[in-house]
Image (cartoon, coloured by chain):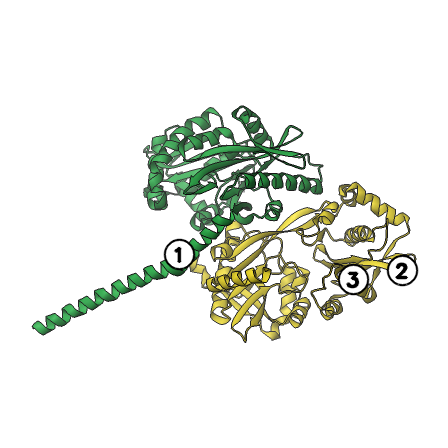
Chain colours: A green, B yellow
Amino acid sequence: MSVDNSKILVRKLSEEEFNEWDMFVENSQHGTVFHNTKWLTACDKVFPGDYEIWGCFRNGELVAGCPLRIYRSGIFKKSSGFLRRAITPYNGVVMKSMPVQIKTRRLEIISNRVIQSLSDAFENEKFSYIELYNSPTLVDVRPFVWAGWRSEVIYTYYLILDNPIREEEFVRNVRRSIRKATKLGMTLERSKNVNEYFGLYEQVLLRHHSRSLPYRKVLHKFLERIVPLIYKERMGEMWLLRKSSGETVAGEIVLFDSKRAYFWSAVNDPRFFDTGAASYLKLKLMEEYEGRFTEIDMIDADTPTIAHFKAGFNPKIVPHYAVKKSSTTYHALSTIYKLSYWNLYKPLINACLHAKKCFTSFQKRRAECNYIGAV
Amino acid sequence: MSVYSNRISIRELPDSKHDLWDGLVQDSYQGTVFHKLDWLKTMEKYTNTKLILLIAENGDEIFAAIPLFLHEKFAGLMKTLLSPPYPTMIPYLGPVFIGYDCWKENKREYHLTCFQRKLDEYLHSTINPQSISIITPPNMLDMRPFLRAGYEVMPKYTYVADVSDLKNVWKGFKRKLRGSIRGAEKRGLEVEESDSSGYDLVIHFLSQILRKKGQKLDVSREYLLEVYEKLFPKYLKILVCRYEHREIGGIVFAPYKEKVLIWLCATEKSLRGVSPTDLLYWETIKWTNENGFRHCEIIIAESQIEYKSKYNFGLTLYYSGKKMRRKYRLLANIYNIFRKR
């Protein structure tokens, strides 16, 4: 279970150590609200799989760690984030913060050792597939690559909160939308009404994420659990934007830790798209958090339409890195699957569809001939 | 977005207008010394490729440029586009954008996306390559257009430091390194600027080091000499280290824009207790500072990192993007399996 590599001991943390982990995450530059055990426990209660936290200890001191959500898919033992990146955008390695005067070289040595030890421990645990989405502050993923992992670049946006917010930096469309919404006299309020939020959420699912529809009930259950929790633990707030008539037009769940705020989930009523509510909500939230935080992570800059909307606020593009590793058997089988899907299954389906089309047109023509013959 | 994308076009820069190229590179945010026309033409000559200089225009205004090298195999059946080509000892090349640092985020994304789409369209309709490999220069973080177009993107690293405060840079060095530099100075090692003789020496030592490892210098000597001829003295500088009236090592670096890039360094290995390499690196950093350059780069943070990280330079990212047609990817994978065996 535990692996000793250059005096670094890797083991799973017990529940009694979770408080220590939370403190560690809070103090680490790589730690985010998504690494917090309260968040992870809430996810664990709703989504399938179990989560574990693997800690790296040096001379008994916790120096790094990584939360894993472990589940079975057929014969394979896998680990990835809850609903991939949708629920936990960052689930990667968290390392102890080092004083500023610590040199690059020393940091490189430490991160190399820690990652190598973790990688060895995961190897011993015999995962078929494992993927980690590291937070943007973990820039150096070379140790993962050297340990045989594949790296992948993904993006997020950081809104840098100037005081006061400079609206002239926003693109023209966003400024226009904000003006429009302001004229409509919309009001922003903190809320705990999950059903109201989920009502809007369902419409978003119907419009854009039809593949997530089967998870509707689970997501509702998750929101019911998470909203009271974020208020109780002071790790976030839910906001609703209302028209002067009282109708809810948009909403946002904002999470935060000691470093920044996160625009984790946003919903909009499609009937009010032309009111500029979405842009207005973002501006109001920026104003709300400008004194408390220096930056807001807008989460997900990869989906083109969403990224296009977010880019209107002139945020900073920030890359972060996913690392993945699969066992030889899993890799071979998934390659065979992919190859057969693209080279056998897809062409076969296309051929069947083509044959069906030909047969239908042939039948049509025969019916026409019969008809002409009969006439 | 589609309203304006008709204004954006990509075309090849005609031979008659090649003199515009260096100006574009100079004005761009990402341009490096490797993008200079002289260096590109030398690469073309020694890598059995054809240089294609492409520019992207928004209306009449040029906003991006990319040098690509066409490599044809099997009588033109297998076409590959490379930027940079190999072997050239160049870590990155790729596209450069003019005004990139002044654009707002959404304008930047718009230009990047249009550039990538038009580039793919242009290449598909003209060359129709089986594979494309682009390694971007640092300062180009956003690779999403390439990811969306099916490129496989990998992060790469290089070491860069701001050397405007030499005291700070010195303090950042590993203690052993500081000791080694002081020791080298005490032992009477001297560093001075050199010319072709110093350059020859570096090539000689490089070949010698590789030969000892059972390897060969993968670029031709002629290529290296031509790079020198075309870029020395303005864009290529050489420092050599002397010990007891004997030249024992040298370093080649390229000052360009605000940055000095350490390109080649080789020294005699038989010396004991003295490290001319450490002294040469330190003298290059000092040269950078004294000549008004702000940054110094030690290229490629994926090899010899034990050595390079001693200087405590920060990590800077750049990306490698590769795209290959599915059938060729399969063939390439099979070929690689057999080649490894």
Q: Residue at x 39, y 43 (%)?
A: A276
Q: Quadrant of residue A345?
A: bottom left
Residue at image mark 3: B208
Residue A283 in the image: x percent, y percent? 47, 39
Kind of residue sitting beneath label 2: Arg
Residue B127 in the image: x percent, y percent? 51, 71
Q: Which mark is residue A341?
A: 1
What distance separates the C-alpha of mark 3 from that of mark 1? 51 Å
Q: Which mark is residue B246?
A: 2
Kind of residue sitting beneath label 1: Tyr
Residues behind callouts 3 and 2 on a single chain:
yes
Residue extending farthest front:
B341
Describe residue A219's horizontal placement relative to residue A89 as left or right: left
Whether residue A220 is visible, yes or no, is yes
Q: Is residue A105 above or below residue B42?
A: above
Describe residue A282's horizontal placement relative to residue A116 as left or right: left
* Residue closer to the observer: B227 or A345: A345
Describe residue A23's horizontal placement relative to residue A45 as left or right: right
Q: Chain of mark 2?
A: B
Q: Residue at x 48, y 32 (%)?
A: A40
Q: Is residue B65 above or below residue B17?
A: above
* Residue closer to the observer: B322 or B289: B322
Q: Chain of mark 1?
A: A
Can you say which quadrant of the picture contains the C terminus of chain B? bottom right
